[in-house]
Amino acid sequence: MNRLDYVVLIATILAIPVYGLWRTRGSASLGQYLKGDASIQWATIGLSVLATQAGPITFLSMPGQAYESGIGFIQNYFGQPLALVVVCAVFVPIYQRLKVYTAYQYLGRRFDQKTQLLGAFLFLVQRGLAAGITIYAPAIVLSALLGWRLNLTIWLAGGLVIIYTVAGGTKIVSITQRYQMIVILVGMAIAFVVAVYRLSPDLSFEGALSVAGKMGKLEAVDFSIDPHKRYTFWSGLIGGFFLALSYFGTDQSQVQRYLAGGSLKESRLGLLFNAMVKVPMQFFILLLGAIVFMFYQFEKPPVYFNQPAYERAMENGYAPQLAVLQTQFDDLFTQKRDAIRAVSNASSNSSSNERDVAMTRVRELDVQARDVRNRTKAVLEQAGADPKSKESDYVFITFILQQMPHGLVGLLIAVILCATMSATAAALNALGSTTAIDFYRPLIRTNASDHHYVVAAKALTAAWGLIAIGVASFASLVENLIEAGNILGSIFYGSILGLFLAAFFTRRVTGSAVFFAALFAQALVFVLFATTNIGYLWYNFIGCTAVLILAPVLQQTIFRSTETPAGV
Amino acid sequence: MRDNEPDAHSWRKAYGLALSLFAAEVVLLYIFTLRFS
């Protein structure tokens, strides 16, 4: 990175919060602080919801994911459009009609206070930890590659978010997310165009896609019913539906985004915008990874993308083993590049048999190159230089730093930081609001002034920001952080979704029955997590189903004598 | 804030449109898969 990159980076990440602070200057009532005002319209809500979900991992890890395993991950988003329609039709009208600040207030009105506190508590635990991971995941990659100090990176990104989120509440989060998302989309579109432009002249764009497809990188849809396959149409549609329904329907960091402004119409339009653009957006991000893969078929990639870890292993006395592997890798790269050119030539000469032979050779060489990379990783582990994050997380950022023109490098680092800031701001805003509304107001100060609760919400938002920074500072103790973030959500979302679905669809169940059913479901998920190897997406389904089955059973047995609620 | 009848009809059309668009996206992705695999 040169001076121009730093100017672009600093200007981009500072300008948006400064503009947000200017737009939200002046005092706000509790309602304005927690829900914004009527000036927040569907486009802002839509981009805000998109930015809250995307986070830095989407832009840092997804292209690397496609580079490694192809674009099949897109299927994980197939349940989302359907879930968003259900949220629009069922969840949003209820939240808007009751004029709640948090989703868990609805549980309090439908059931009782202890159920409200349970829902809010489960959210606080998982979102508080996830906010720390959201700050840590990009910080570890950026600090490793750019030589920035890890703790300084965490404190700068986290500190800036705390300042503007505390100052402006929901409105500033929505406004900044809108512009941060625009920067992200523009930055990624430019990166896509540059990556296509940087492809080898030996191969047309269509030819590159054709070879990438034959190397297994472009299988977007797989209708297989094999349960051992990680990404299929069915697992994405069914598992993804439950995950998205929990996330969009019950996670306050999303609920607060689409309740901003207070209009049912604007909330629904913002969510439907997401239902329509999410799959195409993820497709282009994954396709960008496949294009980067094709770029590195002609331009020699590093044998291991996490270069700082590689260099540590060299310094620790493993240079001879790594040199042997590097030579093998270089040789395989040259052979593979020639084989791909042969595929391209055979394609233009329309010789099908020749092309198939050349393609088989490409695949064989690719398997061998992958084996050399795995052996390199094993050497790194032996050398004690094994990094905490996946190697694929370093693919796209390496491509940016080495292949993009100056200025654009700064913009794309700003994209990753904007994504970090927007997701963290939404999380802190929701954590502060939930603690203030669901815990502080009913349990600690019941009859204080509006101004008192605004101050309390600000203090609690700042406190959660410090907790998130604390989690990020100690996150290096946890292996494989990005996966940890996904698992964390799935462990808690099932029970929370079960609480809400029981509230919506079971008329005769009371608070105590659903409360104990949710406690049991959460314990069941913890036990399954500790003792089995079930795919983590299933925890959403198991937790939710356990609540929905157990709550009516408890109602008909232990809590039979309790009064039936009128319902909300 | 319950939807009135014409509003409910418009929203059902909007949901149908969003889901139809999603179905079209899946079909296009499947054609893409067949074309390049």
Image: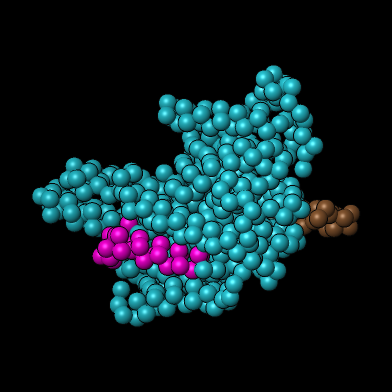
Chain colours: A cyan, B brown
| Residue A387 in the image, given as x and y percentages of width and height | 27, 49
Residue closest to the far top: A557
Quadrant in the picture for the N terminus of chain A:
bottom left
| Residue A196 in the image, given as x and y percentages of width and height | 45, 68
Task: Using the image, determine if residue A122 lies above or below residue A88.
Answer: above
Q: Image quarter for residue A302?
A: bottom left
Which one is nearer the viewer's eye here, A12 or A399?
A12
Q: Image quarter for residue B24?
A: bottom right
| Residue A352 in the image, given as x and y percentages of width and height | 47, 52
Q: Residue at x 68, y 46 (%)?
A: A106
Residue closest to the far right: B5
> Is residue A220 part of the magenta span, yes or no?
no
| Residue B23 in the image, given as x and y percentages of width and height | 68, 51
Task: Using the image, determine if residue A528 lies above or below residue A204.
Answer: above
- Whether residue A169 is visible to the viewer of this picture, yes or no, is yes
Looking at the image, residue B2 sits to the left or right of residue A500; the answer is: right
In magenta, the rendered stretch is: A140-166
Quadrant in the picture for the C terminus of chain A:
top right
Q: How many marks?
A: 0
